[in-house]
Image (cartoon, rainbow, N blue to C red):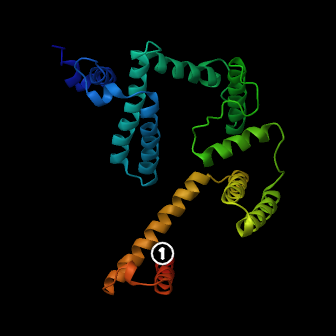
């Protein structure tokens, strides 16, 4: 029988978690579900847990954040254990890789460079180091290394930032606004007579330019959309509450009534 001392020793924290995952993946005595997983099957959970961390931060839910960070950490440990099982690398290699990267990218903290730099200069230095790292990996194209698996809106902004570094960018937001008008007109025309795939293409073009506008206006488009989602949810729930006071549900109402209640909810928020 394996020694259970470590898995019950809260003082060991990280070694304890690594051992728990090792035990879960043990081919003879582990959990059948955990044993069956691979990188591809776990990746969606990793993305989901990252968003749940962001959600807890958005809501200032600090007790929840502790748990959500733990869930995200488990994903790292899970991937590392899968890699260990395949003989690729171990958790220690993961930790040391990021530790080495942080030291290399912060010579003004861990080296002999001056700390007397602006945030903007530090960002430029960071990008220079990252470019050298990409070159060492034979990623010589401007857009190389922008992960395909990123959420589309985030990836759009990253692609645009990369292109902007080599001068492929509009000089200011007014040009982007003009492009939005152009793309919206093209989408309107496509919707009249073109096949669905062309409509989808034009819609994607419009979203891509909207992401570019966010970048020029220094707005995080993901955060802005999350806020819009939260506002819609809040106001629609208020509509439901107001309808309930009238002894009704949304499916017993109509657009005119709900639109009026939406305006009421907006007024209440602004009061």
Measuring 34% from the left and 47% from the top, which residue is drawn there? 64
Q: Please indicate, yes or no, whether residue 109 appears anywhere in the rendered image.
A: yes
Left or right? Give the position of 56 relative to 140: left
- In this view, the residue in front, 87 or 71, is 87
- In this view, the residue in front, 3 or 123, is 3
Measuring 66% from the left and 30% from the top, which residue is drawn there? 145
- In this view, the residue in front, 86 or 77, is 86
Q: Residues within 10 Å of mark 1 (few under 14, many from 20)?
A: few
Give the percent coordinates (x, y) of residue 113.
68, 21
Left or right? Give the position of 24 relative to 202: left
Give the percent coordinates (x, y) of residue 102.
57, 24
- Local secondary structure at mark 1: helix
Give the percent coordinates (x, y) of residue 199.
69, 60
Residue highlighted by disc 1: 269
How many marks the image carries: the answer is 1
Q: Please indicate, yes or no, whether residue 117 appears anywhere in the rendered image.
A: no
Give the percent coordinates (x, y) of residue 182.
80, 63
């Amino acid at each position: 029988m394996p020694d259970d001392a470590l898995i019950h020793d809260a003082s060991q924290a990280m070694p304890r978690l690594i051992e728990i995952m090792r035990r879960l993946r043990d081919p003879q005595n582990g959990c059948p579900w955990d044993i069956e997983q691979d990188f591809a099957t776990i990746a969606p959970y990793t993305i989901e847990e990252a968003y749940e961390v962001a959600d807890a931060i958005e809501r200032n839910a600090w007790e929840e954040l502790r748990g959500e960070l733990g869930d995200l950490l488990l994903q790292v440990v899970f991937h590392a254990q899968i890699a260990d099982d395949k003989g690729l690398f171990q958790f220690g290699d993961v930790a040391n890789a990021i530790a080495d990267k942080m030291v290399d990218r912060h010579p003004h903290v861990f080296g002999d460079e001056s700390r007397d730099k602006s945030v903007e200069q530090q960002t430029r230095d960071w990008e220079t180091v990252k470019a050298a790292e990409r070159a060492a990996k034979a990623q010589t194209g401007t857009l190389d290394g922008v992960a395909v698996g990123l959420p589309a809106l985030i990836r759009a902004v990253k692609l645009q930032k990369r292109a902007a570094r080599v001068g492929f960018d509009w000089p200011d937001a007014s040009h982007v606004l003009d492009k939005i008008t152009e793309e919206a007109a093209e989408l309107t025309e496509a919707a009249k007579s073109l096949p669905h795939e062309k409509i989808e293409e034009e819609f994607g073009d419009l979203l891509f330019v909207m992401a570019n506008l966010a970048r020029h206006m220094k707005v995080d488009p993901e955060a802005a959309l999350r806020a819009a989602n939260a506002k819609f949810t809040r106001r629609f729930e208020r509509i439901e509450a107001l309808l309930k006071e009238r002894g009704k549900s949304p499916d017993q109402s109509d657009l005119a009534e709900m639109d009026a209640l939406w305006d009421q909810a907006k007024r209440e928020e602004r009061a």
